[in-house]
Image (cartoon, coloured by chain):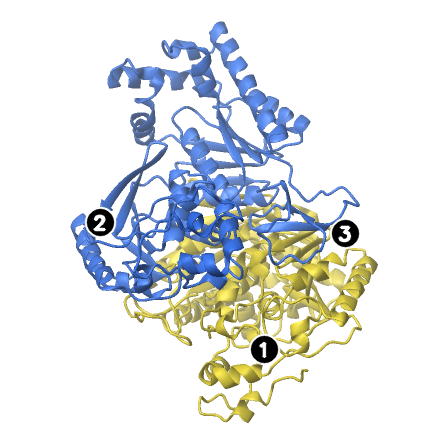
Chain colours: A blue, B yellow
Amino acid sequence: MWGRRRPQGRHRRDFISPEPAFLLESEFPGTNVGRRGRWTRKLCMTNCPTLIVMVGLPARGKTYISKKLTRYLNWIGVPTKEFNVGQYRRDLVKKYKSFEFFLPDNEEGLKIRKQCALAALNDVRQYLSEENGHVAVFDATNTTRERRETIYKFGEENGYKTFFVESVCVDPEVIAANIVQVKLGSPDYVDCSNDEATEDFMKRIECYKNSYETLDETLDKDLSYIKIMDVGRSYLVNRVMDHIQSRIVYYLMNIHVTPRSIYLCRHGESELNLKGRIGGDPGLSVRGKEFAKSLAQFINEQNIKDLKVWTSQMKRTIQTAEALGVPYEQWKVLNEIDAGVCEEMTYEEIQENYPLEFALRDQDKYRYRYPKGESYEDLVQRLEPVIMELERQENVLVICHQAVMRCLLAYFLDKPAEQLPYLKCPLHTVLKLTPVAYGCKVESIFLNVEAVNTHRDKPENVGVDRSREEALRTVPNHL
Amino acid sequence: MWDGEEDGQENAVPCSGDRFVQVCMTNCPTLIVMVGLPARGKTYISKKLTRYLNWIGVPTKEFNVGQYRRDLVKKYKSFEFFLPDNEEGLKIRKQCALAALNDVRQYLSEENGHVAVFDATNTTRERRETIYKFGEENGYKTFFVESVCVDPEVIAANIVQVKLGSPDYVDCSNDEATEDFMKRIECYKNSYETLDETLDKDLSYIKIMDVGRSYLVNRVMDHIQSRIVYYLMNIHVTPRSIYLCRHGESELNLKGRIGGDPGLSVRGKEFAKSLAQFINEQNIKDLKVWTSQMKRTIQTAEALGVPYEQWKVLNEIDAGVCEEMTYEEIQENYPLEFALRDQDKYRYRYPKGESYEDLVQRLEPVIMELERQENVLVICHQAVMRCLLAYFLDKPAEQLPYLKCPLHTVLKLTPVAYGCKVESIFLNVEAVNTHRDKPENVDISRPPEEALVTVPAHQ
């Protein structure tokens, strides 16, 4: 969304200029820059691309942070890509032999590793300068000042802002846990026993230690960076330059690695669900109330430590939570997507009254904004504080709504904008998300209380001149 | 935002006029303890942080020990009061610190305060230990905020901004005051023990270095501390001005109708041109222009001929079922709602719409970004402008919905000392008045005339 010029489209129905105005995305997700007609001066509104450079010994969580940060930035609408130099090395050197590859006096090894770093930087340049990427995360050890100088110069030459993220950790338990989580299963160790792999990897870490130059408050005082110490116990932040760096710092300071699970589900079936109507603020149906009781039972059986329960401020989620008999918190921002003029309509009625809008929505369901309502894109922006707080928390159950749940799920499962509005989030089904390695394990638990299907797939024909039948083909059954 | 209720007391269904529970950020109160030599910005940070937290709905109060000292020792004589071997001085200063802590305890434990900011030098580990124990005994979470600065220019500028005008120096010349104050700082330097990465590794704190060039953050414990850290890392002291105004008069304004997405009236378009002229004349360096995503602010910005950014969160308050109605129509169709709104205009939520309280929550990212930015012009709407203004001028929730934000008037806000200077510039294009004062009778049984007595004139 950032730095992209996008012609004002049908989505911006509230735009008034008779001539098309170009909308330039600005620094902040959720805002647009408007100009009318021709440029009269060179716009310097858009940020220059940002190059994030990871720093740290092996098994300090660099790739974990890279992937997580990339996932978060893409979700909030900042095109981001990570470049893992280890992966380049694996692609080049087909078979990993041993830690000796990483010995500081291994000429052949050094040559290959430098080649890989340069190949990765070249791809970074292509992504940021030619492919409209906005942030690139350069994931490698980058443990010497010399290597970081090279990368910084590369950034300067190309007009990128460079931001370093260093992870420092000396706790042997943490490092051992990391090795178990993500190294033992690495392609490098596919033919080794766990003990062999661990032993080799510890020696690999040793190869880096002698030449390791941590970011220094004095020597590196002119660089922009965050130094994360002991998995987030403390942070040193230096020279944050702009909005995106500020958001990155805030995000990094809120994530943690304590094991926990996040439970996502929708409210119980509602009266309007039964009738195939969208939105509104209805109460639960008979089956919806049954689901609430089943949910209470399920939660009890799971025996979750210190579970927090969150709902929206709409009746159907609150009624569902009430059955649990535990305290819960209501978030207005968890309210279902506002369908504006289409609130409480059936899809048949939308087709009848707003056939054009209906087709436009099918053409771009993520960005389409209901007249006087919201788009999925708007939803993501208003859900960002929920994601931030979910990152801070441990065990949480979020009782929400179909579109809201799709947005949250897309964040955890790294689903792109095109897929997000079509993620399947059926009623009466709990999704249990547990962070594992670099991603998220999902368990889907149907709580055995029947409910209507509310999922409408994208129809084949999304043209504005399509027939009524073609538009309504994928509408699920209802009363 | 915050509800002091215990868990489990919320209603099953929120109704209009009721308070509702937002995120429960902390259960125990938070004690923020400032640390630093004099003239390092502690009081500036205390006041700003207090203002921010109150605006987002966290009841916060600051306790300035220097003020307690001024109340006790009526007349300040000289820096010698602060000499480390001045027994009398030490005794009085300790007394003041304890009196302030006692008031902290009353605020947090008896008056439903949620955050207390204890503003004093607190430069010795021993003093901080005492305060930390006090926090523990009372069940508070303690968070230290230290400001470290060695740049003599910054310190000199601080002295000019806030010390020369202090009651302590009311009878001195600027030179005398500065000389005395520098000696006052010296009194603290020998015993100053900065927060240390090793010795203080179990404390929760943020250390701000060189007015925000870098930060050391240790053991952030909960949501509110995380928000405080984020806020402190985004504020700056570079001189700049923020310009707030509404869109030009709209077609619905003329008819006395609220909300909607109308275009500008003839006079509204004139205003837009006047605004362009005004902005040009002001010759503002690197001005950023922000609008909402509604036609009337966009049309206003278009006249400026410069790039502008549209924020959806700057859209006017959603009046739900009352959108595009006149107040007369609201009284006719929703007399009960109309009365409830007058009873608590800040928290009242239009059916299917929003409250001012909701508006503050959605405007928080705007405030955060305004803090990061320098010169900005925000073209917005009446309710939105009231919320932003309340933040800058530290107006409480009861006053916020009645702040006067007339059409065609630019408010120029310039941070100065501990607050904000406001200049109001009417751009000389007439417009309707859209300000409805709180009527005398807010009872649900009131007759229509009493409900409508404060409605401004319209077509």
The alpha-carbon separation of the residues under discs 1 and 3 comes to: 32 Å
Q: Amino acid at mark 2?
A: Ile
**Marking on residue B285:** 3
Residue A294, labelled with which disc? none
Please state which of the two labelled residues, at mark 1 or mark 3, is closer to the viewer: 1
Q: Is residue B399 left or right of residue A444?
A: right
Q: In this figure, which residue is indicated by the disc labeled 1?
A: B402
* Nearer to the camera, A369 or A127: A369
Instruction: Say yes or no: labels 2 and 1 on the same chain.
Output: no
Q: Secondary structure at mark 3?
A: loop
Is residue B199 visible from the viewing direction of this image? Answer: no
Earlier in the chain: of badge 1 and badge 3, it is: 3
Residue B55, x across and y down, in percent: 52, 66
Q: Secondary structure at mark 2?
A: loop
Which chain's residue wears label 3? B
Q: Which residue is mark 2?
A: A304
Question: If the image is split into quadrants, where does the C terminus of chain B sit?
Answer: bottom right
Does the image show residue A131?
A: yes
- How far apart are the alpha carbons under marks 2 and 3? 56 Å
Circles 2 and 3, Cβ within 8 Å, touching? The answer is no
- Secondary structure of the residue carrying tag 1 is helix
- Nearest the camera: A279 or B107? A279
Q: Amino acid at mark 3?
A: Lys
Report, in whole angstroms, how far the alpha carbon at label 2 lies from the one at label 1: 47 Å
Among the 4 quarters of the image, the one containing residue A1? top right
Front residue of this view, candidates B327 and A255 = B327
Q: Both on one chain, marks 1 and 3?
A: yes
Q: Quadrant of residue B395?
A: bottom right
